[in-house]
Amino acid sequence: AQKVTQAQTEISVVEKEDVTLDCVYETRDTTYYLFWYKQPPSGELVFLIRRNSFDEQNEISGRYSWNFQKSTSSFNFTITASQVVDSAVYFCALRRGGGGADGLTFGKGTHLIIQP
Amino acid sequence: NAGVTQTPKFRVLKTGQSMTLLCAQDMNHEYMYWYRQDPGMGLRLIHYSVGEGTTAKGEVPDGYNVSRLKKQNFLLGLESAAPSQTSVYFCASSTLGAGGKYEQFFGPGTRLTVL
């Protein structure tokens, strides 16, 4: 069975601080995908990134960066110089690889509050 | 393209009433999914479909039925609503995921309250 753990239920930081959201996953599959989604107060799910298990390169997109480490089964997300607009619930998710129809296994989410 | 749309956006039901949530996608995706989101629980898979005329159970299927009569539509039914089904429901569709690529697209959600 697959599992995603986001141990941080809520994080509150002051604007311009850097913040890291942790994600630890469990799977027996050798091929899998990892995702991060953002859910702003408006409620929709916004796709941020997909990472394949065979690609351990870290990725940076503007103020966002992701650190994928298979050795520790972690896929952490860092926001640099946080802004109030970053306030949202962030979900980490896992899907097994291959071309099957499996859905995503989500973590419980981390509520990020950026205070002005 | 509209992507994934859901109807209705909000609904209030009384215990025992029935209703159907409609999901439509215009991306010609084979796979479609229904999730529910409860506070502090993340999203959990209810049912999914691998193609027209086929459906399968996910993690939390009890109390729900689904149908996929057309490729672009995926219906979620509640035959006798219960307060425990108060939740936000998300529909999603995805590509086949071949070649190392996989994309799942979510609808805007339906907020359902059962009194």
Image: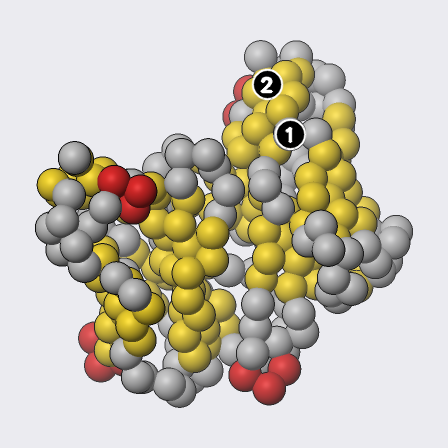
Residue indicated by mark 1:
B9
User: Of B14 and A110, which appears nearest the observer?
Assistant: A110
Residue appearing at x 34%, y 49% in the figure = A90
Residue appearing at x 16%, y 39% in the figure = A12
Residue appearing at x 20%, y 40% in the figure = A114
Residue appearing at x 29%, y 56% in the figure = A5
Label annotation for residue B60: none
Q: Confirm whether residue A2 shows in the render.
A: no
The amino acid beneath tag 2 is Val
Q: Chain of mark 2?
A: B
Identify the image quadrant of residue B23. Answer: top right
Residue indicated by mark 2:
B114
**Residue A6 x %, y %:** 27, 53
Disc nearer the start of the sequence (1/2): 1
The amino acid beneath tag 1 is Lys
**Residue B51 x %, y %:** 79, 63
Which quadrant of the figure contains the C terminus of chain B? top right
Q: Secondary structure at mark 1?
A: loop
Q: CA distance from mark 1 to mark 2?
A: 14 Å
**Residue A22 x %, y %:** 22, 59
Q: Where A33 sits versus A40, above or below?
A: below
Crowd band around label 2 with a 10 angstrom C-alpha radius: few (<14), some (14–19), many (20+): some
Q: Is residue B79 left or right of residue B71?
A: left
Q: Confirm whether residue B45 shows in the render.
A: yes
Identify the image quadrant of residue A57. Answer: bottom left
